[in-house]
Image: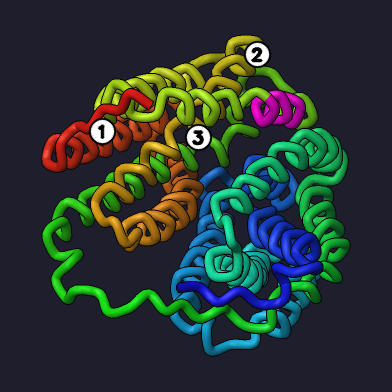
Amino acid sequence: MRTFPKVFGDESRLFILAVLAAQVIGGLVTQMSPLIIGGVIVGFNLSEQQAGLIVFAEFFLLSVTAIAVAPFLPRIRIRVACAIAAMVAVLFQLTSMFLADYHLIAVVRCIAGVGVGFVYAASLAAIGSHSRNPDQVYGYVQVTWALLSVVLFSVGGYLTEQYNHKGIYGLILFLSFLLMPCLKFMPEKIAITEDGIEKENSGNVFNLWGCLTLIAIFMYLTASAAIYTFSAPLGERAGLTTSQIGYALTAGSGIGFTGAVAASWLNVRFGRATPITAFSLAFCIISLVLCLNTNPLIFVLALIFSVVFFYFSVPYLFGLAAALDVKGRWAAAAGSAYLLGFAAGPGLAGTSVEWVGYPGLGIVCVSSTLMAWVLLILVVRQIGDQTSQV
């Protein structure tokens, strides 16, 4: 049984405002990563590999921080801790706008990643422990990102084109600073749950298949993040400017939710194997088109479809993990695999482009996606490909 603090009385709207603000502060860097990559390459005169490694380092610290602090959050006064972490992030984001050294910028961005990683983890924990309807609040998070992205990619694309990395870092800094006062409405502590004693061996049956699921999610997200974070340099190869790529990402964000709606409607009417195969095949084709194509119109269409199929894929990835354990432990672990995959994507993309070029990046992403598909189908067959008439 969950205990609900006063925040779900008259102050519930303030709680929702606080966790939405924390989610945005914690997720801005990953959301705006395509423009960050493009801005860093031009602003610091770096290779794709160097730029990818900078972003990888920041994403990695963000994801590791989010995972590492989760067990300790119930012991922490998260309202104060979130404010401190956000201030640290803002301070080092500001610092990164004025650095010209490749190594220093990597260190500074890593420290900023630790700050936003803590805020990200605390917001997820607050939603899960304080909400009467966590699914509804998570839905508010998705709607918030959809609405914000329409503006952020348009403005961010223009600022990146005009001011390189300083433009996009400045936008992230401004929005983070603007939202920081909302964190004062975060709950003081994570609510304590009293779910009773679980059976010692309740999760052991699916340990192997759970691990395979996590590996598959990590591989799929790594490939997806590699393409997503390098969409700016890929678009420039196709003849687009940074601001035009920002507009394409804006369109993708607006249209992309049709993928999530389709997944919600389709559910598991035809089992899990069919939709998993569909989005895996679609992403393989889209990866090759984005990496081999030099036509701007085809690039924009492929980029939009990549967002649509990504939104379509995520519910099935987390749904499969949830199907392994009614207590939701594998679903929670899937969130960690998701973050780590997103962290690894820029590094994979930068290294691939440096060694084998953009066509090679497409082949690497296709290979990773196909291996993820094989593992996912193995798990689906092991647990039974349930269908639903709902």
- SS assignment at label 1: helix
Q: Residues within 10 Å of mark 1 (few under 14, many from 20)?
A: many
> For residue 373, which numbered disc appears in the image?
1
Nearest the eye: 102 or 385: 385
Query: Mark 2 or mark 1, which is nearer to you?
Result: 1
Q: Residues within 10 Å of mark 3 (few under 14, many from 20)?
A: many
Any magenta on residue 58? no
Q: Pointer 2: what residue?
A: 296
> For residue 150, which numbered disc appears in the image?
none
Nearest the eye: 351 or 179: 179
Where residue 10 appears, as percent x and y from the top left, is 80, 67
Asked whether residue 75 is in view, the answer is: yes
Q: Quadrant of residue 19?
A: bottom right
Please report whichever mark, 2 or 1, sits nearer to the chain's N-terminal start: 2
Considering only vertical position in the picture, is 373 above or below 75? above
Q: Amino acid at mark 1?
A: Trp
- SS assignment at label 2: helix
Q: Quadrant of residue 175?
A: bottom right
Please report whichever mark, 3 or 1, sits nearer to the chain's N-terminal start: 3
Q: Which residues are magenta?
A: 246-254
Q: Tell me how far mark 2 sits from mark 1, CA to CA.
A: 30 Å
Where residue 52 appears, as percent x and y from the top left, is 54, 50
Q: Amino acid at mark 2?
A: Pro
Q: Pointer 3: what residue?
A: 227
Any magenta on residue 250? yes
